[in-house]
Amino acid sequence: MNEDLKFLKELQAELNTQENDCQAAPRFWTIMDYKKSPGNEDYDSGELQYYFNDGDHVVFEDFNHLKEFIEEHYEEDIDDELRWHLNNEDIEFLWQYITNNLNDDGYFDSVFVKEEDFIAPNTMFLTKAEAKRHLELNHYRYTSKAHTYAMTAWRAPKVERLLKILSELDFDSLAQEN
């Protein structure tokens, strides 16, 4: 029982002194992350994403990634003209060559994508410190842009009451009664 009361007192102190990240009470923290989704180049800000899909979907992050892929998988097709394109370091120029000369099967393609944020599923933390620690320990599950994100438990009276109790209850008097 004493360990539980100690835990509740420490949680209370943390709840009452942590940053609120501009969120109204009752607040909790999640993990915000980002993903690329198809977009409309007339309406969205974004970029072309180049990929190879023969059942194994490979997205080319940059020119060097595309170059390495071509050198590894199309070694026998590299002639002087392709070598020149591979050394040019212009991904659009190389992409045009690839789609015109190496794409008989239609595996190379591109799509316009935009970056979207999302709340990572199955993340809910009472404290920002706990959310940060989760992100540190599980960084491999998220992109490098992932961060803690405060949210309000809007119109959740039981959550609001529980957090108010945790924030205001005098745990020292409870300890003395036991």
Image (spheres, rainbow, N blue to C red):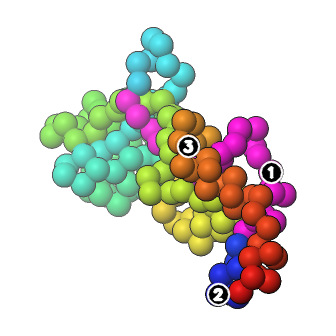
Q: Residue at x 75, y 63 (%)?
A: 169
Mark 2–mark 3 Cα distance, whole angstroms, equals 27 Å
Q: Find numbered disc 2 in the image and state the secondary structure of the residue it sits on.
A: loop
Relative to 116, residue 64 above or below: below
Residue type beneath disc 1: Glu
Closer-to-camera residue (125/164): 164
Q: Looking at the picture, how far across and down is residue 34, in whole percent?
A: 52, 43
Give, as a single range, the part of the protein colored magenta. Answer: 9-38
Q: Amino acid at mark 2?
A: Met
Quarter of the image that includes the N terminus: bottom right
Q: Residues within 10 Å of mark 3 (few under 14, many from 20)?
A: few
Element carrying mark 3: helix
Residue 41 lies, in percent from the top left, at 45, 17
Query: Residue at 60% across / 67% down in the picture?
Result: 134
Q: Earlier in the sequence, mark 2 or mark 1?
A: 2
Q: Is residue 3 above or below residue 19?
A: below
Residue 47 falls within the magenta-colored stretch: no
Mark in front: 3 vs 1: 3
Q: Which residue is mark 2?
A: 1
Residue 171's mark? none
* Residue 100 location, quadrant: top left
Could you say where residue 23 lies in the image, as x and y percent from the top left?
71, 39
Q: Circle 1 — which element?
A: loop
**Residue ID for mark 3:** 157
Q: Which mark is residue 19?
A: 1
- Residue placed furthest toward the front: 177
The answer to the question of whether label 2 and label 1 lie on touching residues, with beta carbons closer than 8 A, is: no
